[in-house]
Amino acid sequence: MRNQPYAMRDPTAELSPILRERLAPCKDLSTATIGLLSISKERSDEFLDSVAKSLSDGGLSVLRFRKPTYTRPAPETMIQEMVERCDVAIVGLAD
């Protein structure tokens, strides 16, 4: 896991795009902690329940997170907790 501070970025204010180096994906998910973030839209929890079950049935460690509302960004403390506790994050949207 990472013990690095997370810096929230606002992509809407970019005046000129900056190319950023992509992080290498995990080579082995068998020891990874997967974070599932629900954005709190209707049925997103239902979808992530299914994803969590599939991952857990496969022997993976899963942590669940849920935004208070889909109309606002996730709280900084929640994002920081995900950065510190998870190796991979999946965001569940639904509509």
Image (spheres, rainbow, N blue to C red):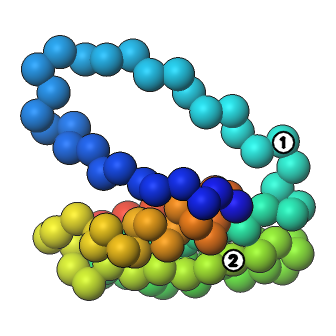
Counting from the top left corner in percent of width and height, residue 92 is at 44, 66
Q: Earlier in the sequence, mark 1 or mark 2?
A: 1
Residue 56's disc number: none
Callout 1 secondary element:
loop
Left or right of 59? Residue 66 is left
How packed mark 1 is, by other alpha carbons closer than 10 Å (few <14, some 14-19, many 20 or more), is: few
- Quadrant, the N terminus: bottom right
Which amino acid type is marked by label 2?
Val
Element at label 2: strand
Q: CA distance from mark 1 to mark 2?
A: 17 Å
Amino acid type at image mark 1: Lys
Q: Is residue 6 left or right of residue 11?
A: right
* Coordinates of residue 95 in the picture (x, y in percent): 30, 67
Tag 1 residue: 27
Residue shown at 39%/16% (left/top)?
19
Q: In the rendered image, which residue does mark 2 sit on?
A: 62
Question: Can I make out residue 54 in this image?
Answer: no
Residue beneath the point at 31% across and 68% down: 76
Residue situated in front as seen by the camera: 82 or 66: 82
**Which residue is rendered at x = 11% and y = 34% of the image?**
13
In this picture, residue 33 sits left or right of residue 81: right
Q: Is residue 9 above or below residue 38?
A: above
- Quarter of the image where one finds residue 89: bottom right
Q: Position of residue 50 (x, y in %)?
A: 62, 79
Instruction: Residue 67: name its quadrant.
Output: bottom left
Residue drawn at (22%, 72%), measured in percent from left and top? 70
